[in-house]
Image (tube, helix red, strand yellow):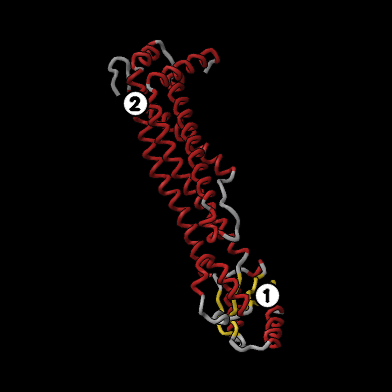
Amino acid sequence: MKISLVGLVFRQVGTSFRHLFWTHVLTAATMALTLFSFGAFMLLQTNLEYLLKGWGDQLQITAYLNNGLAEPQVDALMQRIGAMPEVARARHISHAEAWRDFQTALGAQSGLLDGLPRDVLPASIEITIKPENRNEKIIGQLAARLKDDNDIASVEYPQEWVERLELVVLGVGWAKWILGGVLFLATLFIVRSTVKLALFARKEEVEIMQLVGASEELIQAPFVLEGMIQGLIGAGVSLAALWGVYSLLQDHMPTIGFFLAPFGQLQFLAPHHIALLVATGWLLGSAGSLFSLRRFIRTWHPSSAKF
């Protein structure tokens, strides 16, 4: 396209936005809703992956001790566990420490413990696994060896919950693309309708351009540019809404912090996710307009003025 025609294209775009303002607003809002839904799944997936990584980094085995173990027996058990090649470190938690930790976790509800003996909670050993050994097979074998120790009553580790969370993350990832695909198709239909309305509103202008021999590229350029602008506006609105939701959740972190602790605060979308959202909005608007125009322009002749 010649540089001299660029001004014409932008004037046509400005005229369209003035005359069909609410139609463009509706289309941009629809794109924003679609991109917000897609971005919300990305935000959820990002935080679930972060949570999964945090759990993996702090994966521990808890070995509950038999009642009545003497201090020398506990020391010997700690040495045996510390000598295991999979173990990074081990920490003994006495009856009194277990009671205090549980009381702290209950907070204002700690009065429920009144009247219970202080040794009602068993003593235990928290065993942290070396990063290179954090897989289901090795942890299962280590847990089995610990269960065979006569000084250990039972062994627990959250590997099952980590595996379930991995499935949840995978499900969210698939849902993101499936729901996103459905919403994108619906948005393309709305963009198609917007282009059709714009063509009807500028029917005479398009007919004149066809009669004077204007190329298809020149006729299509304003509509494609409008779609790009709508997509970028929709992406900007969706990002602003996602940031609002993120900020709202951050403000309520004290009430949900027990779920994420000790893995820190919520995570917002990474830069490449933001770029993907903006690029998707841009492509959604431009591709929707272009595909619709190729169908309408080629079947619309000045003599019939029909689609």
| Contact check, label 1 and label 2, Cβ < 8 Å | no
Taking 45 as reference, is 279 above or below it? above
Taking 152 as reference, is 273 above or below it? above
Where is mark 1, residue-wise?
90
Taking 274 as reference, is 298 above or below it? above
Which one is in front in this view, the residue at disc 1 or the one at disc 2? 1
Which amino acid lies under the numbered mark 2 shown in the image of this protein?
Lys
Along the line of sight, the residue nearer the viewer: 162 or 301: 162
Seen at 43% across and 15% down, the residue is 214
Disc 1 element = strand
Q: Is residue 56 left or right of residue 209?
A: right
x then y, percent, for residue 57: 63, 63
Q: Is residue 225 in view from this perspective?
A: yes
Of marks 1 and 2, which one's residue comes earlier in the chain? 1
Where is mark 2, residue-wise?
196
Label 2: how many Cα within 10 Å (few below 14, some 14–19, many 20+): some
x then y, percent, for residue 161: 51, 67
Residue 163, numbered circle: none
Q: Is residue 30 left or right of residue 253?
A: left
Disc 2 element = helix
Label 1: how many Cα within 10 Å (few below 14, some 14–19, many 20+): some
Q: Is residue 162 in view from this perspective?
A: no
x then y, percent, for residue 90: 68, 75
Which amino acid lies under the numbered mark 1 shown in the image of this protein?
Ala
Seen at 37% across and 12% down, the residue is 208
x then y, percent, for residue 145: 61, 82
Along the line of sight, the residue nearer the viewer: 307 or 165: 165
Among all residues in the image, which is located at the extreme top? 212
Q: Count up the numbered dots.
A: 2
Query: To which quarter of the image does residue 67 belong?
Result: bottom right
For the residues labelled 1 and 2, the Cα–Cα distance comes to 69 Å
